[in-house]
Image (cartoon, grey):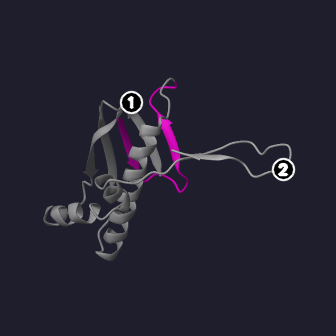
Amino acid sequence: MKITLLADEHIRLDPIGSAMTIEALSPEQPFSPFHMLAGSLATCTYSVLYSWASHAKLDAADLALEVTWRFADDPHRVGEMHLTIDWPSLPANRANAARRVAELCPIHHTLLQATTVEMTVRQAVAASGSAAAAATA
């Protein structure tokens, strides 16, 4: 798999090689947490589609995915994402089924539902060996 950082708010996943690689169009392009989030959605969706294609006897060799996103404010976050399934060899009569299968991706469901995030702060263990203090926010 190869994830290419196409812009600050755009990635592409191509099924190239067996190891996951991440490339940018320029050395100045950093791999951000937002790229990682989009990469998670793309990788999960690819896995679900590839599995379905195998069972449906469809060729998925040219399956690739692109994810773009836009930010929202107050607080700063990803406000919307758009996933494009680029699959030139997919028969036209299977496009709607492919879309329904893509929507089965667990990361897709996670992003659609409110997710509870609990946070703990661990502090260094005191010299006396007592347990670390933890604060929960």
What residue appears at the point 33 percent right and 76 percent down from the top-left corner? 55
Amino acid marked by disc 2: Gly
Q: Is residue 128 left or right of residue 137?
A: right
User: For residue 56, what is the image quadrant?
Assistant: bottom left
Amino acid marked by disc 1: Asp
> Is residue 98 one of those drawn in magenta?
no
User: For residue 101, what is the image quadrant?
Assistant: bottom left
Question: Which type of secondary structure does the marked residue at label 1 adopt?
Answer: loop
Residue 62 appears in the rendering: no
In this view of the protein, which residue sits in the foreground, 79 or 127? 127
Q: Residue furthest left?
A: 93
> Is residue 17 one of those drawn in magenta?
yes
Number of numbered discs overlaid on the protein picture: 2
What residue appears at the point 53 percent right and 45 percent down from the top-left corner? 21
Q: What separation in Å lies between label 1 and label 2 (alpha carbons)?
A: 46 Å
Q: Residue furthest top?
A: 28
What residue appears at the point 84 percent right and 50 percent down from the top-left corner? 129
Q: Is residue 69 left or right of residue 18?
A: left
Residue span colored magenta? 8-27
Residue at the disc numbered 2: 129
Q: Which mark is residue 8?
A: 1
Residue 99 in percent (x, y) is at: 21, 60
In this view of the protein, which residue sits in the foreground, 74 or 109? 74
